[in-house]
């Protein structure tokens, strides 16, 4: 098109030049001719056409086309007659105007073609983004988890008070030296791999495995001279025998139009985590895992419900005489534990209300009754000699029924937050009073103990609140309170009910080691007390916090091992110079943490002293560092000032100060 336009313009210019050469120069004595030409400017002839066609010249001279067939040809001009003057400037202007129009037309066409190409390119980009987004949801293996290494240093964790009457100390070790030392240290590691396999937009499979799960650095050296003759002693070992993979959870998730369906072995977390805690934090060691089938319907008026059934215990099972069944088969349903639960957790709406600057309460949970028959301890069964050698003769029905309501409240507004959780355990375990036991298979005292109902009435709660101050919420002032009910009339904290104490001997089968409940001055032990002539304490009322709910570094985490039979209050301060994302800052960089924890028992008999309530005052200080690519490092120091509740009254020994240092490096992904 441009080539044709240029050719037409060139022909027009050449023709215009020829006309200009043949026409006589205009004279000043011909003003009328100029005037006529100016009148004809309103409909000028096509100069380019006139140059290409002689007829156009006639039109320019005033002769209409086709006049040769209607009238005789015009006579040639007489000699001496003057032709009309030709205006070359006007002709050039007309030609340039035509060129401009053609160029503009071509430009518009090119612009339209370019716009179409841009639209097509944008469509391709959008298609590419849609494909990438689809790849993120469909058939994509998404790795998650972390790798961490932790080190610990302890000093005087036994508080210099010696063992309790049952021979136990507050903390295991050290044991070498005379006198024994007071310091100990170790380091461990864990690689948690928790990927997600997205089968489709509505189907996904999740699993969690811990590799080298809290394995101590330096443990399991290969020292057998016959297997490895080059390292006959541990000091020369260059490799390790540990190859531990702990597959903890595998579950599936199905998203339907009615709601979300989940099934498998999965973790469970609720509220602050004092009762149910999945243990997915970087510094956690425990975590609740359930074999569960659950269904969550769609949102209903701002609430999100979940109905679930957990299988706690399957009892006796078999794979056949020689494993010919190819799988384990449950031998009886009556020995299974099948609790069911329902919960309401509108957490998503709490986040939305926080963004709108409103406070909102979170949900609550209530466990319906559990039916949990359990096998009796030892060889217990009704009097029936015909089935003495059958599995039935070794089982007695135990009725267990528990209720565990759990309320969680979350209020968030601008720079202020308050989270509170309260949980209860109400239950009863018993054997029917009319159950007959074979006296040759079970001792009469054990039968009496099994027939004695055991009741549970436990309370636990925690509250956390903080307020952000300064630019970008750099300073965070917090206050925390927590408490777990104790067991009045029983000795010891009750966090280790499997421990045999210094109390009265409990009923046991012949040949079994003697088991005693916790006695006065014991640090921990069992609270149940069955005498041969009756019982004085057949209840368990101390609530035990989930061990993944970490409060401090020494007292509750390492000495008592959990919050139970006591309460605490904890003011804290956290300062991040770069600010927090909640305030428009950056969560990367350094953060300083300082806190103080005061703890006290509810009942004097639950303390190791059995005479005093105050347990201690602990100070924790630490610093962490986080990079933009999610590397995390931190170090913390703890100091415990023990109080009279931890005295050893048997030896009249007061406890002394304990120290702890803890560091952690982790790469979450």
Image: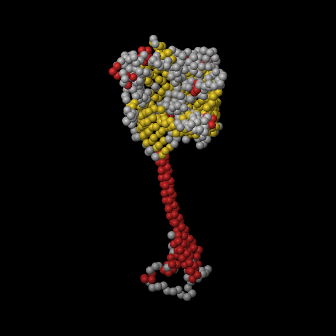
**Residue 598 percent across, percent down from the top left:** 61, 23
**Residue 43 percent across, percent down from the top left:** 51, 73
Q: Among all residues in the image, which is located at the extreme bottom? A: 79
**Residue 395 percent across, percent down from the top left:** 39, 23
Between 552 and 212, the one lying in front of the other is: 212
Above or below residue 41? Residue 75 is below
Q: Is residue 627 visible?
A: yes
Above or below residue 244? Residue 616 is above
Between 619 and 342, the one lying in front of the other is: 619
* Residue 357, picture quadrant: top right
Q: Among all residues in the image, which is located at the extreme top? A: 533
Q: Is residue 32 visible?
A: no
The residue depicted at 55 percent of the width and 20 percent of the height is 524
* Residue 260, picture quadrant: top left
Task: Classify the position of the C terminus by image quarter.
Answer: top right
Picture mark count: 0
The residue depicted at 41 percent of the width and 28 percent of the height is 315
Above or below residue 531? Residue 228 is below
**Residue 633 percent across, percent down from the top left:** 62, 37
- The structure's colour scheme is secondary structure
Between 10 and 287, the one lying in front of the other is: 287
In the picture, measured across the screen, residue 340 lies left or right of residue 161, that is left
The residue depicted at 45 percent of the width and 83 percent of the height is 68
The residue depicted at 55 percent of the width and 36 percent of the height is 242
């Amino acid at each position: 098109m441009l080539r044709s336009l240029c050719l037409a313009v060139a022909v027009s210019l050449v023709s215009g030049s020829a006309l200009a050469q043949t026409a006589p120069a205009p004279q000043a004595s011909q003003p009328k001719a100029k005037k006529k030409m100016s009148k004809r400017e309103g409909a000028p002839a096509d100069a380019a056409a006139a140059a290409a066609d002689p007829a156009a010249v006639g039109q320019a001279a005033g002769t209409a086309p086709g006049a040769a067939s209607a009238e005789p040809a015009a006579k040639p001009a007489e000699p001496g007659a003057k032709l009309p003057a030709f205006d070359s400037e006007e002709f050039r202007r007309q030609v340039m105007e035509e060129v401009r129009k053609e160029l503009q037309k071509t430009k518009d066409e090119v612009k339209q073609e370019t716009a179409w190409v841009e639209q097509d390119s944008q469509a391709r980009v959008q298609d590419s983004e849609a494909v990438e987004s689809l790849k993120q949801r469909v058939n994509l293996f998404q790795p998650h988890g972390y790798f961490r290494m932790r080190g610990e240093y302890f000093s005087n964790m036994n508080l210099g008070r010696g063992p309790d009457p049952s021979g136990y100390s507050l903390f295991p070790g050290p044991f070498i030296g005379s006198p024994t030392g007071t310091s100990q240290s170790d380091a461990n590691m864990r690689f948690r791999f928790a990927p997600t396999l997205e089968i489709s937009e509505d189907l996904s499979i999740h699993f969690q495995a811990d590799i080298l799960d809290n394995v101590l650095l330096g443990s399991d050296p290969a020292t057998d001279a016959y297997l490895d003759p080059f390292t006959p002693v541990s000091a020369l070992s260059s490799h390790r025998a540990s190859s531990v993979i702990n597959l903890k959870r595998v579950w599936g998730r199905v998203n339907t139009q009615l709601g979300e369906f989940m099934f498998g072995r999965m973790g469970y977390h609720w509220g602050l985590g004092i009762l149910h805690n999945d243990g997915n934090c970087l510094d956690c060691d425990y975590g609740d895992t359930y074999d569960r089938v659950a269904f969550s319907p769609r949102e209903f008026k701002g609430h999100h419900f979940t109905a679930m059934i957990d299988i706690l215990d399957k009892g006796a099972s078999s794979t056949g005489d020689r494993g010919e069944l190819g799988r384990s088969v449950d031998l009886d349903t009556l020995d299974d534990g099948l609790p069911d639960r329902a919960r309401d957790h509108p957490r998503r709406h709490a986040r939305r209300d926080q963004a709108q600057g409103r406070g909102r309460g979170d949900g609550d949970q209530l466990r319906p009754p559990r039916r949990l028959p359990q096998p009796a301890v030892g060889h217990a069964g009704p009097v029936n000699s015909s089935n003495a050698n059958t599995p039935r003769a070794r089982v007695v029905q135990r009725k267990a029924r528990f209720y565990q309501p759990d309320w969680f409240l979350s209020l968030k507004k601008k720079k202020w937050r308050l989270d509170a959780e309260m949980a209860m355990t109400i239950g009863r375990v018993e054997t029917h009073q009319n159950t007959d036991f074979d006296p040759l298979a079970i001792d009469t005292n054990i039968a009496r103990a099994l027939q004695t109902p055991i009741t549970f009435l436990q309370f636990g709660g925690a509250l956390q609140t903080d307020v952000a101050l300064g630019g970008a919420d750099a300073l965070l002032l917090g206050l925390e309170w927590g408490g777990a009910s104790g067991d009045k009339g029983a000795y010891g904290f009750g966090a280790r009910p499997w421990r045999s104490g210094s109390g009265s001997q409990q009923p046991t089968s012949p040949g079994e080691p003697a088991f005693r409940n916790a006695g006065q001055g014991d640090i921990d032990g069992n609270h149940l007390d069955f005498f041969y002539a009756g019982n004085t304490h057949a209840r368990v009322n101390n609530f035990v916090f989930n061990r993944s709910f970490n409060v401090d570094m020494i007292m509750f985490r390492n000495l008592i091992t959990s919050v139970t039979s006591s309460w605490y209050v904890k003011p804290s301060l956290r300062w991040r110079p770069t600010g927090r994302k909640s305030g428009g800052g950056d969560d990367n960089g350094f953060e300083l943490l300082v806190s103080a924890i005061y703890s006290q028992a509810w009942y004097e008999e639950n303390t190791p002293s059995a005479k005093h309530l105050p347990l201690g005052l602990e100070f924790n200080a630490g610093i962490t560092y986080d990079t933009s690519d999610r590397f995390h490092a931190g170090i913390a120091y703890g100091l415990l000032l023990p109080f009279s509740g931890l005295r050893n009254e048997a030896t009249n020994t007061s406890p002394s100060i304990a120290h702890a240092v803890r560091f952690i490096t982790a790469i979450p992904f």
